[in-house]
Amino acid sequence: MWSNQFSRRHFGRIAGSAALALSTGSVKPADAQSSLGGQNSRAAFPADFRWGTATSSYQIEGAVDEDGRGPSIWDRFAHTPGKIADHSTGDVADDHFHRYKDDVQLMKALGTKTYRFSIAWPRVFPEGSGPPNPKGLDFYNRLLDELAANDIEPFATLYHWDLPQALQDRFGGWMSRDTAKAFADYSGYVAERLSDRVKHIFTINECSRLVHLGHGLGLDAPGLQLSQAGQNQVRHHVALGHGLAVQAIRAHARPGTKIGLAENMVNCIPAIETPANIRAAEIAVRELNAGYLTAILEGKFTENYLAQADAPKYTAEDLRIISSPIDFVGLNVYTPDHYVIAADNAPGYTLAPFPASFPHMDAPWLRVGPEALYWAPRHAAKIWGVKSIYITENGTSSTDQVAADGQIYDVDRVMYLRNYLLQLQRATSEGVPVAGYFLWSLIDNFEWMDGYQKRFGLYHVDFNTQRRTPKLSASFYREVIRQNAVV
Ligand code: PNW
């Protein structure tokens, strides 16, 4: 089940029309001054809600050889012929390493007060472990100072998939517990030096994808195709790395530093919102996230997960480390993973197959199901009692043609965002503890195996000139932030 679902999600060919969901947008007048975060507006968010954008290091920075940065598994992978759709690499990407000041101004123009970015491990430890490279860390010092000068609060991710190649070469990267230990050392080092300005730290971005696409399907770096048992062991080491990093950050960061993770939870939606289907969806969420989120938040695996022949090898001490208390959970939510119906069978649920006509955006996997953004945080709060949730990614790619007048009229992205945000607002209005939202992404960037062919930015990037142009969706998002409500 687990192993098929990512492949289906990503690479299932969906025939038929891509009819997009109808907008159910708010009927408020565009100049709704009266509804500025007002109590009576049905689409208003909590007054202290944090709005931001998200990026990751390899996808935007470029400058892969500067200031002593070592190679990462993504440098190696992208430079391997046949791995990236348009034969591109992240060598230059958005040249954010040199243009970060301009990019901070783009955030400011949106009115965002927070920003989620990731730190490139191989800039800080070019060999993964051993001697640090303070010059590499300095890039983040410059970025943090620029963010502070512009009143934008940083949320830093320590691992968004750019593992130092040296660790892959030395002991097979995440196939070894040694990588979990090296990750903890790197995390403690960074926390000690940056936690004067960074108050929110995410350990690892999307364990689910790094395991399945990186070590199962071989479509992400390091491009391995391990058995199910091998993938389960990798997942266990990633979870262990997360837990060890939580402990290292607590030991080295300033008091009050908040720690969490950012996960693409397998998100299960009750097909029809009846109490029985909602209960079935909750059971499915626990089971389908058993090796990672469930273990982290409950301190144990589910019985079904352990009953499978290829369950990971672990110790009780591992589980104690993995479940080290965290302060918040970040959820990356793009799409409904499953629609669930209650059933009288052993697991207690049926996963409905997706009809070929199910609408999707500019990627077969990016199905339009706005209610995903309601159910993901509601499930996390209900099932695991999570008290603080951030939506750490949400957004969509769009074909984004530049019109004759030079503008990008991405009304499809606006439609997607409006409908998803209405569902997020439904969650916050019911008291689901979502504290903020980071839109993926600030700028078009290197979209992994799709290269530069898939654009997720609020700002269009001309990769020949590095010129950034706001899309219509940037205006939409600025208005949402200004009104603190879905417009
Ligand atoms: C995320 N899904 O990946 C990553 O964290 C980003 O680096 C990436 O650029 C972005 O989404 C867009 O792809 C995901 O199938 C891939 O639900 C797939 C899914 C979710 C997130």
Image (cartoon, rainbow, N blue to C red):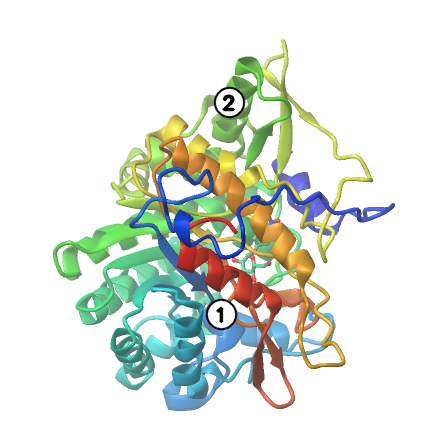
Instruction: Spot the residue most to the left.
Output: 255
Residue placed most toward the observer, 93 or 25: 25
Q: Where is 20 relative to 111, above or below?
A: above
Q: Given the current orientation, which residue lies at the most extreme right position?
A: 16
Crowding near pointer 2: few (<14 within 10 Å), some, many (20+)?
A: some
Q: Position of residue 307 (x, y in %)?
A: 52, 24
Task: Report helix, strand or loop for mark 1.
Answer: helix
Query: What's the CA distance linking mark 1 and mark 2?
Result: 39 Å
Residue, disc 1: 169
Q: Which residue is mark 2?
A: 283
Image vertical order of residue 184 relative to residue 294, above or below: below
Give the quarter of the image for residue 203. bottom left
Nearest to N terminus: mark 1 or mark 2 = 1
Instruction: State the quadrant of the N terminus.
Output: top right
Q: Does the rendering let one see residue 281? A: yes
Task: State left or right for residue 67 relative to residue 215.
Answer: left
Q: Which three-letter amino acid code belongs to the residue tagged 1? A: Asp
Q: Are marks 1 and 2 in contact (CB under 8 Å)?
A: no
Along the line of sight, the residue nearer the viewer: 435 or 188: 435
Which residue is depicted at the point 54% across and 67% down?
474
Is 385 on the left-hand or right-hand side of 349?
left
Percent x, y for residue 323? 30, 38
> In this rendering, would 472 be left or right of 31?
right
Q: Is mark 1 within 8 Å of ligand 1?
A: no
Tell me the kind of residue under disc 2. Answer: Ile
- Find numbered disc 2 in the image and state the secondary structure of the residue it sits on: helix
Which quadrant of the figure shows ligand 1?
A: bottom right
**Is 144 above or below relative to 380?**
below
